[in-house]
Image (cartoon, rainbow, N blue to C red):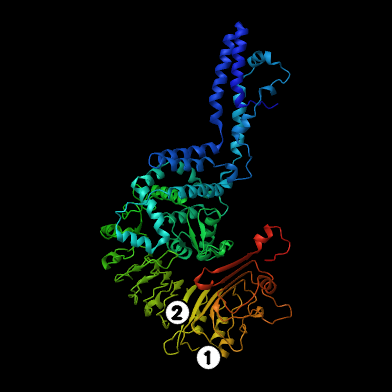
Amino acid sequence: MRIRIKEEQVVPLLKHLNYARERTDGLASELDNIKSKLEAMCVLLPRVKDWEEKLVGQFHDLRQHIYFFMNPKLLKDICAEIDRINVSDINPELPKEDIGGEIGRIDVNDINPELPKEDIGGEIGRINVNDITSKLLKYIGGEIDRINVNDINCKLLKYIDSKIDSITDIIKKLPEESPSSSSSSSLKQQSRPEEAQPRKWSNEWSRLNMPKMLLDDPAMKVLRLSYDHLESLQLKLSLQLKLCLLCFSIFPENSVVKKRPLIYWWIGEGLVAKTQDKTADQVGEDVFQELMKQGLITPHHKSEKIKSRPIKLVNSCRMRPWTLRMLISVAKEADFFEFDSDGTLSGNFSKSHRACLVAGKHAQISSSGDKQENLLTVFNVNEPYPSLKREWLLKLKRAEVLQLGRWQASPTHHIEVESLNGLGAQKLLKYLSLRGISRINELPPIVGLVSLEILDLRACHNLEKLPSDITLLKKLTHLDVSECYLLDSMPKGLEKLTSLQVLKGFVIGDLERTPCRIGDLVRLKKLRKLSVNIGSEAVIREGEFAKFKEIQSLCSLTISWGVVKIEKGQEDSMNSLSFPPQLSKLDIRCLPQGTPPGPPKWLKPSKLERLEKLYIKGGSLSSLDHGETNGNEWKVKILRLQYLTKLKITNSEVLEKFPQLLYLEKVERGERNEDDIVSEWNKDEEDKKGLNTATP
């Protein structure tokens, strides 16, 4: 029979002991002994609470730190938020009663329910407190052993962060910085409203030395569970996941990080690499998605109205503030990067092989002497005007990653350089990013970058031409020149880059200025992703669009038109467009008006038998009626229709035309500069609602 003693019954029991002692002089000493043991139990019981009590204790320490610096009225509100933390909210599958509650159900009457209360003193005399304590602790140990930290880890972090968000809302009510702040600072905050508020209260916390106390706080040990238990994941990528996760420690709080630069960084450092059945890109995607599934990073979309987009389609992410602070603590301890005592990035790298360009601290890197030669990675965090001096670049002899360009999702982050002289001497360099950097008209000779695998020149708006020696980079697997609007041709010999897997921004212009054409890409046997920009003055040769079909390895194709209407004589070239058999993703942008009106002849299920993703953005498409019968139907699973003003179609009609659809996203422009109108449909969510037939 289980012994049950309720905590609140111990005190009445002591009263019975006093009464029994008065009536039984001979048992006085024995009762005193029992009394002392029961008093010890009173001390013991509060100490055997489960891990929920420990978590609350950690937050209590944090509350004590805040107490000395915050307004007492606001502190009261903060404490109220903390005190409402409940394990059942974190994991509903856990028993509602905690271990302390289980202990509290111990009832003395279960020892002998027939015993009169008057004889309770004698019965108590036969209680072996050591046996009770042993069984009690054994039971507690069993309950604790059944707690699976990995199961509750993700939900724990999400719940903590939701509470911290509530606390943050209260803290934001604190008085802003003094009116003596400079007008230039105010102007910067107004130019980027999304960053203004976090900067105000973050500066206040820094002034009060709060970041350092948070890093040293015992509560950080609880949050580090998410990092320490990554090795228990079934992916067998524990070390890989941890190292990739530590890369997030350098990004400022509330930053929106693009996925692609992250994966390129991981590839450059060798944190992810190709396997027997997957490319390095695909392995990087798996790591990114796993970090998101674990709740360590959260998806971010351009529109807040997008709620149910699948993880595989997420291109940007954020990190929760408390997860970031935990990572800073780990990265600082492991010398992954160097941080100051308050957790801010340092411009030094005496202990680390990675250096960061931080606004106002670049001079420390430039004057670091011979230590630069040992650098593995140089990452521009937020320096808008990096001083890339020739002698500085020449010292980066062992560098494998130069992330000098933009990593942020927003294109408003300005970066400008005056010269790239000295670039080209880094023989071990694998990843070079100049993304979004202004004032780059052309690149210096880069033939010396013999190990270069990834060259990211996206959104270099002043770039007018590529160097001819780019065709000598035999190890190049990724070349991105998309959004380089002054670039009107590709250099001859691009087909010699036989290792190329990803080519973005391939330009088709007029015949005289476009020596490299689509037909030349057929020689790229490893090319998996291709994006093509057709300029406003482009002349398409007869049968040129049919050459796409001959790029047998191509899985993803994006075509962007710079013309509104197909000129006479170009209709046949337009309709000759055909696709390789392995194509699984097709992205059509600004589709021009054809003759006759309606969908083009190549946009049919029989022409795209393995297509799973179809994106159509902008243009004159007015219908999705392909007109095919004989059992031909779309196998598309993901469909995104954006800004198609002439296409009038309901979700039900879309599902009828695309019977295997799993996700539908429709975006229309709002009237009078209002927000976009977003419509989503997700089959998985419909199934969760218990719908037998998925209808929007």
Residue 39 picture quarter: top right
Q: Is residue 654 left or right of residue 336?
A: right
Q: Position of residue 319 (x, y in %)?
A: 47, 55
Q: Position of residue 504 (x, y in %)?
A: 47, 75
State the residue at coordinates (47%, 38%).
Answer: 60
Q: Earlier in the sequence, mark 1 or mark 2?
A: 2
Q: Position of residue 628 (x, y in %)?
A: 70, 81
Identify the amino acid type marked 2: Lys
| Whether residue 498 can be seen here | no
Identify the amino acid type marked 1: Glu
Residue under circle 2?
A: 496
| Whether residue 208 can be seen here | yes
State the residue at coordinates (60%, 8%).
Answer: 22
Q: Nearer the viewer, mark 1 or mark 2?
A: 1
Residue under circle 1?
A: 567
| Residue sitting nearer the eye, 594 or 399 | 594
| Residue sitting nearer the eye, 212 or 338 | 212
Q: Quadrant of the C terminus?
A: bottom right
Q: Is residue 185 left or right of residue 263?
A: left
